[in-house]
Every structure is written in structure tokens, then in C-alpha cells.
Image (cartoon, rainbow, N blue to C red):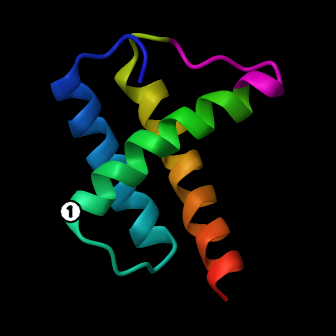
Amino acid sequence: MQGLGWLAAIIVGGLAGWIASSIMKADTGIILNVILGIVGAIVGNALLGLVGLNAQAGSWLAQGVAGLIGAVILIWLYRAVAG
């Protein structure tokens, strides 16, 4: 999460991961929610960059949306691979 401090990245990542796990009806714990949100933000920012969109580096909301999108994609990919 570029532009956010470590504490903010953990908070935004945790919220994004929790919302994504709620949307996808995944039974994940708080640690996995934070990891999903932070890694999801990296994935979401990369995918948004490919289509020409750029989440503002310092914006909590933009990073949260990117994290949510990325976390939902990660949960979906995990389910597709794991069966």
C-alpha cells in the first residue's frame, strides 16, 4: 500500500479483507483478513493500473477499494484452484 504508513496499511487491509471475506462468504480469521487486504491492495492496484486507473497513493478510501477488489479476486482464485 504505497503512500500509507504501516499502521494505516494494516487497518485498511484488515477492513478490506474482512469486507471481502463477508462478500465471498469465506470463513477467514483476522490475520488472514489483514493479509488478504494488503496483498489484495497490491493485486488490485496492479490490475487497476493495467486498465489505466490509478488509486491515489495517500487516499485511504482508494486503497481500501483497491484492496477489496484484490482480496475478492484472491479469494475467488483460491477457490478456483482448490476446488
Main SS, magenta residues? loop
- How packed mark 1 is, by other alpha carbons closer than 10 Å (few <14, some 14-19, many 20 or more), is few
Callout 1: SS = helix
In x, y percent, where is residue 77? 66, 66
Q: Residue at x 39, y 40 (%)?
A: 38
Does 68 appear in magenta?
A: no
Q: Residue furthest bottom?
A: 83
Residue to which mark 1 is pinned: 30
Report the side of 29 relative to 65 (left or right).
left
Q: Amino acid at mark 1?
A: Ile
Span highlighted in magenta in the image: 49-56
Looking at the picture, does residue 69 appear above or below residue 50? below
In x, y percent, where is residue 25? 45, 80
Quadrant where the C terminus is found in the figure: bottom right
**Could you tell me how many numbered marks the image carries?**
1
Looking at the picture, does residue 8 appear above or below residue 70? above
In x, y percent, where is residue 33? 31, 58
